[in-house]
Amino acid sequence: MPKSIEENLDKAGYVLFRNAISESDVELGTGFINDDKVLYSAMIDFIETVVLGKVNEILGWDSEYIKFRVSDNNNSSDASTFHRDILCHDHKKEVYPVYTLLLYLDNAKMELIPMSHKNPISRFWDALNIYGLKEELNLNPGDLLLFSSTMLHRGIFTEKIDH
């Protein structure tokens, strides 16, 4: 992995890769979402070859994924509040480097609280103290956002893909 990317993941907790996925591949991916139905077998292949292929190319990784979620705004109620994708309940245990990767097929906004991954166990008052550090990212189709799964983040949904 390039040193600057590794340092950004460690320090801020995230890296944004602009236009990582080509316009034609974005169109391919959106084609697997039809009439509020997802063609999951095609989407799995798309994720494994196109998306993870690009991540592996950029980072020199051999990535594996555990799950994926396709959203056309249907998760806006649970993902629109600040949350962590992985919760850590024991401050004595080591937190392993697990990342969330988001691919945007439409325009969207995300808010992240940089460095919040450094303290994955925090109280409500701790979160209030760092809330002012939040950054809003405008994301375009084809952007990949990689961040620590313990980072506080939320989605701000702005568009819905129409087919």
Image (spheres, rainbow, N blue to C red):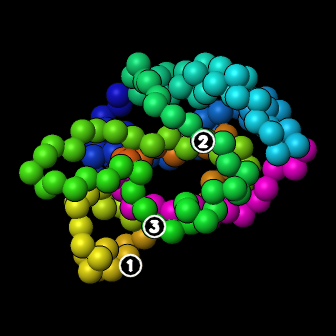
Name above or below for residue 81 compared with residue 13: below
Which quadrant of the figure contains the C terminus? top right
Dot placed on the residue nearer the N-terminal end, 2 or 1: 2
**Dots 2, 3 in contact, CB < 8 A:** no
Secondary structure at numbered mark 3: loop
The numbered mark at residue 154 is: none
Secondary structure at numbered mark 1: helix
The residue tagged 1 is 132
Secondary structure at numbered mark 2: loop
Name above or below for residue 72 compared with residue 4: below
Q: Main secondary structure of the magenta part?
A: loop
Q: Residues within 10 Å of mark 3 (few under 14, many from 20)?
A: some
Dot placed on the residue nearer the N-terminal end, 2 or 3: 2
Name above or below for residue 25 compared with residue 45: below
The quadrant holding residue 7 is top left
Residue 32 seen by the camera: yes
The residue tagged 2 is 69
Of badges 2 and 1, the one in the foreground is 2
Name the kind of residue labelled 3 in the image.
Answer: Phe
Name the kind of residue labelled 1 in the image.
Answer: Gly
The numbered mark at residue 82 is: 3
Label 1, label 3: how many angstroms apart (C-alpha)? 13 Å
Stretch in magenta = 150-163
**Dots 2, 1 in contact, CB < 8 A:** no
Judging depth in this view, the residue of 63 and 143 nearest the camera is: 63
Identify the residue shown where x is 83% and y is 33%.
31
Name the kind of residue labelled 2 in the image.
Answer: Arg
- In the image, taking residue 133 as reference, residue 25 lies left or right, namely right
Q: Is residue 45 magenta?
A: no
